[in-house]
Image (cartoon, rainbow, N blue to C red):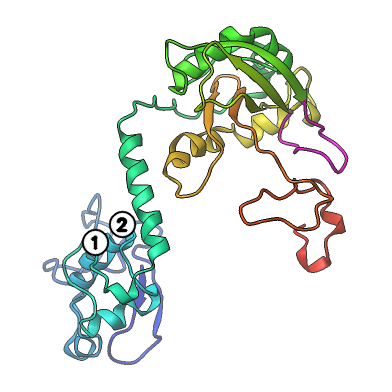
Amino acid sequence: LCYQRLTGTGPDQGWVSLKLKGGNELLVEAGSGSGTSSTADAPQPKEEIVKAEPLDAEAQAELNVDLETFLNGYLPRLNSGAIVGPIETYPERYGKGEVKLAPGPLEVAAEHKDPDFEKLRAAVAEKREEFAKTKVPEMKPYVHVTKKDLLEKATKNMNGSTYNIAIPANHTEFLKLGSAWLTDAFRASGVLPNDNSVKGIVAHKKLPTTTVDAAGGAGPKMFITVEYEKPDPTLHTELFVKMPWFADGGSRADGVDINQKGGDSFPEIAFYRYMGPLCPFRVPKYYFGDVCRENTNYVLIIEKISFGKKDNGSFEPYEVLPLAEKYFDFKLQPRQRVE
């Protein structure tokens, strides 16, 4: 139990144990009844909630706020993002009567409002309402896969745990499944209406995984150019595909150790599915993403980002900067390195 001294003498704050190793209580809640001494024969409660005692008169006057009232007003505001001004000065401002007691959105004086932030707040609220109308399937619970099972199953095209569509094991399988698979995947994710389809994969380009042009080391990536049966200005034809290393052996380079020990890539997919539509700034459009919990294979398809050229001397606002170089941390100044 963490304590803070309100009156008397002694350390200002610290930690104390509630029970001995054998289960005997060292501290009991004040006013819990007679017989507070702890013995081996005394019955022990299954669960005990230690409540904070109310502030004494001196502390109450200093803070000018009832602790329970303060927390009831503060926590809902903190969770809803309604705290206005520095959180560190909230108790002081609360004590001065500068913060309303009722939980919920806080009315902010016009001179304290940030017009740009209010626009972002409105955009997020609108996107949240739109996203709430969709029926996005829930991901199945995480399953830790043994190395033996991974080597047996990761080379197979097994169904994903969200959309129940086969997840290609590698780029070769992805291209082999082709437009029919993309049509099913995009319809399942909701980006492609049922009266439209992917006509074909016009071109593809595997991205480098080494040298200064490497696109990353978590797995192979590629760009694909697709054609739709019905051209649609809301659908991108230039897309980015990310997949794990093909687990056809047993080395780290094949991705077995990475996937078996480090978990799968659902957190990244979840960002594009759940957070992307709510962000008040541009996020690459999500087309499809799923993970097979049984073999850790995954695929993520999003809008392609056109990175700026490295030989450009300067960039305009909102232009995308060049791709950051991977694996060259040793070139950083010592104070920038993370070993």
Magenta stretch containing residue 95, yes or no?
no
Secondary structure type for disc 1: loop
- The kind of residue on which mark 1 rests is Pro
Question: In the image, residue 169 lies at what x, y percent?
Answer: 67, 16
Please tell me which residue lies in front, 140 or 179: 179
Kindly report the distance in space between the C-alpha atoms of the residues bearing marks 2 and 1. Answer: 8 Å
Q: Residue at x 40, y 61 (%)?
A: 117
Q: Is residue 265 found left or right of 208 in the rendered image?
A: left
Graded by Cα atoms within 10 Å as few (under 14), some (14 to 19) or many (20 or more), the crowding at tag 2 reads few
Residues marked 2 and 1 touching at CB (< 8 Å): yes
- The kind of residue on which mark 2 rests is Ser
Magenta stretch containing residue 211, yes or no?
yes
Label placed on residue 80? 2
Magenta-tinted stretch: 206-220
* Residue 219, quarter of the rendered image: top right
Q: Is residue 115 found left or right of 27 in the rendered image?
A: right
Q: Is residue 28 found left or right of 146 in the rendered image?
A: left
